Amino acid sequence: MSNYQQAFESVVAKYKLSLFKIAATFEADPTLQMDLFQDMLLAIWQALGKFKQQSSLHTFIYKVAYNQAVSHVAKQSRKQDITQLHDHIACQRSDIESYTNTLQSLAHITSKISSLPIIQRQLVVMSLEGMSYTDMAEITGLSVSHVGVQLNRAKTKLKQLLEDK
């Protein structure tokens, strides 16, 4: 075992709990805490050879671990921003697709309504607007019972047309 490896293992043994605490402070998710802990160990491994003893080993290890934790949080934040952006775009795409499908369905239904006789077309449209039979009768000049008959015929015909596609 090399001196470098021994020094590293000594640092890990001595500061392991402190590194776990740093990881837990910066990351709430246990899986990501372990990722951060491993990233800190790698950063310490890489930095240990650069230790110039200008500060205590303890300060040096904390600084390396802290910098790694800050980098981790920044990276996770970017990932979250990208995920949120992706979700937003997917939601918008879904909304657009839903809107397009609705328009296509509406166009299909409208074309089927257009194939009905004119009086039935008018009654269906007024019915879709929520008008009462009395109001429809007043507008068209038909009797209330005749509005009912014509509207039922229109609905039956429309149902057939929509089922045939």
Image (cartoon, grey):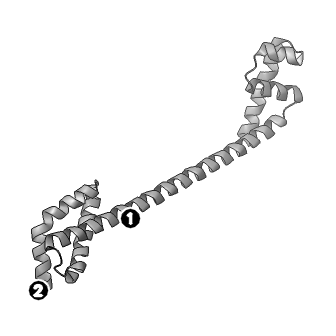
Q: Which residue is mark 2?
A: 3
Residue 96 vertical placement versus 43 (above, below): above
Q: Is residue 130 above or below residue 32?
A: above
Q: Dot 2 lies on which element?
A: helix
- Whether residue 38 is visible, yes or no, is no
Kind of residue at disc 2:
Asn
Figure quadrant of residue 47: bottom left
For mark 2, does the 10 Å Cα neighbourhood hold few (<14), some (14 to 19), or many (20 or more) residues? few
Helix, strand or loop at label 1? It is helix
The residue that appears at 22% across and 75% down in the rendered structure is 44
Q: Residue at x 13, y 67 (%)?
A: 15
Question: Horizontal placement of 145 versus 91: left or right?
Answer: right
Residue placed under numbered mark 1 in the picture? 75
Q: Nearer the viewer, residue 108 or 30?
A: 30
For residue 3, what is the image quadrant? bottom left
Where is residue 123 shown, x and y percent of the image? 81, 24
Classify 140 as above or below 122: above
Q: Quadrant of the C terminus?
A: top right
Mark 2 → mark 1, Cα distance in angstroms: 33 Å
Residue type at numbered disc 1 = Lys
Give the mark nearest the N terminus, 2 or 1.
2
Is residue 144 visible in the rendered structure shown here? Answer: yes
Residue 149 in the image, given as x and y percentages of width and height: 80, 18
